[in-house]
Image: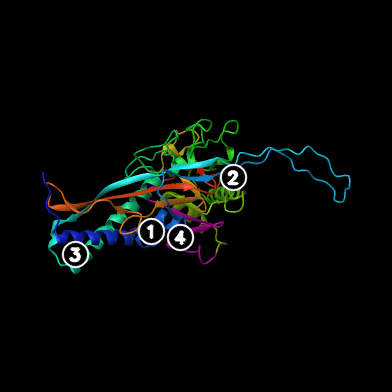
Amino acid sequence: MAGLPTTEAARTLNTMVTSALDEYSGDPANFVNDGGFLIMAMLANNGRIFKVNDAERVEHPVRHGADAETQTRYVGDTFAGASNNFGHAQAETLTKALFTMKNVTGNLNIPQSLLDRPSRLAMSDVQYIVKRYMENIFEEEEMYLLRGGPLATSDEDHIGPYSGDAHYSATLGSMSLLGLMAIGAGTTPNPDTEKFGNIDCDATGDGDVRWKPQLFQATNAAPATSAELAVFLNDWERAIRKTSKFGGIEKPTHGLITEGLNDVFVKALRDKTNINDSVVKDMGGNDVIPFRNVNFMWSQYLEKDTLWDITAETTAECPALLLNLNSLRLNLAHGGGVNEEGGFVKQISELAPHPKETNWFSRTQYKYCYSLDNGRRSFAQIEGWTVAN
């Protein structure tokens, strides 16, 4: 059956859609800051949203290896020289963490009535429609990272980032925070056999124990008294200190907690009357809790679940996460659109009418993945807190 002819108005509207997509997806860092997205804004503010080439996967070298040879030490001006059996072995330096890029496609729908409007009026409507569409994209990708699924009501899930990982999903997101924290860290998933980014945490196999995230235990399940609140802060202080011992950029920069844990954090800091810094003295009015050079924030989408009992998966516990935003990054395949400098969301078809509907659509596509380029051991989870969500 022949399609409806493309009118001059449709061509004009198509150009407007393409221009708006390039505008909003061409500068994602600025867009997510304006949109108020939690994780996306954290990544943007730390320069962790990257343009990458269109490829099957993103690869990052893991520099954990060491040469098998012990260096020779000797006193200078030894004319006879210092003898030693110099070796020629070199550590395997090609081990790379692998992260499969995901393709996402959908329809951008436009009301048919826009074709009848003057260009100056249609342009504003197109801008709003495309902006809302881009907001939906970032909200959904943030949800996939936080929970492993597209909706706030979906169950949290382990998601591995590489197609060869046991917990990889072809139809879900690039990776989940639960997968980042749990795969290889507890008894389930098995650290000796199951991989994250194609690397396991078994020292006797082809993996590396330094690819394992840190796991700590809370002292009190539901801190309430002044003494228990002090221990609550000590638990965080200890976890941050031990996760920061690797130095350089392998250390946590941000904390992510539930609303219930945020309330406990605020109560614990207020209980310490000797804390009078202007940043923390009014903890109820700030979105960020600074503690030991780590900025803590809470997310409404994180909920306690038995899966966050990483050791045994028997008790519903609150996710209490330390993230290294010097390592976690969002990779967006750029190019396409009007030109190769266009945004990461590509319009892959011109506007066309739905055969049995009164609106028009354009098919869009983008490609992305999350990855870790500076290690995984600087991420941590404290398990054991069971306070109200």
Instruction: Residue at 36%, 38% (x, y): give it.
Output: 170
Task: Return the x and y of residue 254 as percentages of the image width and height.
Answer: 50, 54
Which comes sooner in the sequence, label 4 or label 3?
Answer: 4
Q: Which residues are magenta?
A: 276-302
Neighbor class of circle 3 (other Cα within 10 Å; few <14, some 14-19, many 20+) is some
Residue 389 in view here: no
Please tell me how crowded label 1 is: few (under 14), some (14-19), or many (20+) other residues with Cα within 10 Å: many
Q: Nearer the viewer, residue 296 or 340?
A: 340
Q: Quadrant of residue 86?
A: top right
The residue nearer to you, when weighing 136 against 335, is 335
According to the image, label 3 marks what residue? 122
Q: Picture coordinates of residue 6 (x, y %)?
A: 15, 55
Q: Amino acid at mark 3?
A: Ala
Q: What residue is disc 4 on?
A: 45
* Residue 111 image point, x, y percent: 16, 56
* Residue 187 as seen in the image, left or right of residue 241: left
Q: CA distance from mark 3 to mark 1?
A: 24 Å
Residue 337 in picture, x, y percent from top left: 31, 56
Rendered residue at 35%/53% (across/down) = 138
Q: Which of the two residues, 105 or 217, is positioned nearer the viewer here? A: 105
Residue on which disc 1 sits: 28
